[in-house]
Image: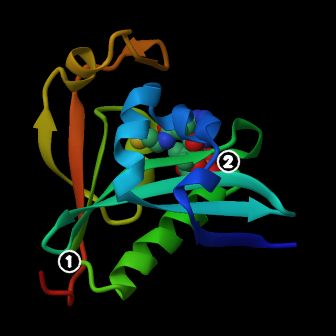
């Protein structure tokens, strides 16, 4: 059996997966209707999900990517991210953006695929979430905006 990645209707993406990457269900529900959703399945079971929305002019934002905790560190997240990057490259996108914490393994996860830091949103997590968010025991305050530019695709 191999990993199957495909675009699916919004309703088919398990909310519990999306909440791993974004603890606010309200926020997730606010961007889902105007997003494209993708899932990765192994042996018929959904193990990962990714949500991407258009910002217009060939720019897309990766809103959420998550792999079920029992399946993390098996390269499913890497395969899903690569697949989604290639999907939007193939559809003529000029760039993809993502917002992530200012430290932690997720930052390396994106940078390994060519995302570069383009700006910093200070205190984003403190301003936008009612509860403090911790990663490795350290409170997350600032959000880095990262951008992957698709060379060859014109905006
Ligand atoms: C980020 C995520 C999607 C990566 O998926 P994954 O299938 O676990 O990742 P991979 O197996 O492809 O590994 C990618 C790298 O991340 C590291 N990694 C994955 N999960 C990790 C964890 N829980 N803690 C530390 N490192 C982790 C892997 O070791 C690997 O690093 P390496 O290349 O140096 O060995 C997944 O860990 C996840 O769902 N995390 C919770 C939600 C989240 O934070 N989403 C991103 C929001 S910005």
- Residue depicted at 32% across the width and 66% down the height: 114
Question: Does the residue tagged 1 have its C-beta within 8 Å of any atom of ligand 1?
Answer: no
Residue wearing tag 1: 94
Residue at the limit of the structure toward the top, as seen here:
131
- Residue depicted at 34% across the width and 32% down the height: 103
Question: Does the residue tagged 2 have its C-beta within 8 Å of any atom of ligand 1?
Answer: yes
Q: The N terminus appears in which quarter of the rendering?
A: bottom right
Say left or right for 65 vs 71. Answer: left
- Closer to the eye: label 2 or 1: 1
Q: How crowded is mark 1: few (under 14 residues within 10 Å), some or many (20 or more)?
A: some
Could you say which disc has been placed on residue 73 in the image? 2
Residue at the limit of the structure toward the bottom, as seen here:
152
Q: In the figure, 116 relative to 82: above or below?
A: above
**Mark sitting earlier along the chain (2/1):** 2
Residue 155 spot, x, y in % from top left: 12, 80
**Residue nearer the viewer, 11 or 1:** 11
Say left or right for 111 vs 42. Answer: left
Q: Quadrant of ligand 1?
A: top right
Residue 84 spot, x, y in % from top left: 47, 70
**Residue nearer the viewer, 82 or 61:** 61
């Amino acid at each position: 059996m191999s990993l199957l990645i495909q675009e699916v209707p919004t309703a088919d993406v398990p909310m519990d997966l999306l909440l791993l990457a974004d603890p606010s269900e309200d926020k997730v529900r606010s961007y889902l209707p105007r997003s494209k959703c993708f899932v990765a399945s192994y042996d018929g079971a959904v193990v990962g999900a990714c949500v991407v929305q258009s910002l217009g002019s060939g720019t897309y934002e990766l809103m959420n990517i998550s792999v079920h905790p029992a399946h993390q560190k098996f390269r499913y997240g890497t395969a899903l991210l690569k697949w989604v990057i290639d999907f939007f490259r193939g559809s003529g996108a000029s760039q993809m953006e993502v917002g992530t914490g200012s430290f932690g393994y997720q930052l390396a996860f994106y940078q390994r695929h060519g995302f570069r830091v383009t700006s910093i949103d200070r205190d984003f997590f403190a301003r936008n979430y009612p509860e403090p968010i911790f990663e490795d025991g350290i409170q997350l305050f600032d959000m880095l905006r990262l951008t992957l530019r698709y060379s060859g695709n014109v905006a």
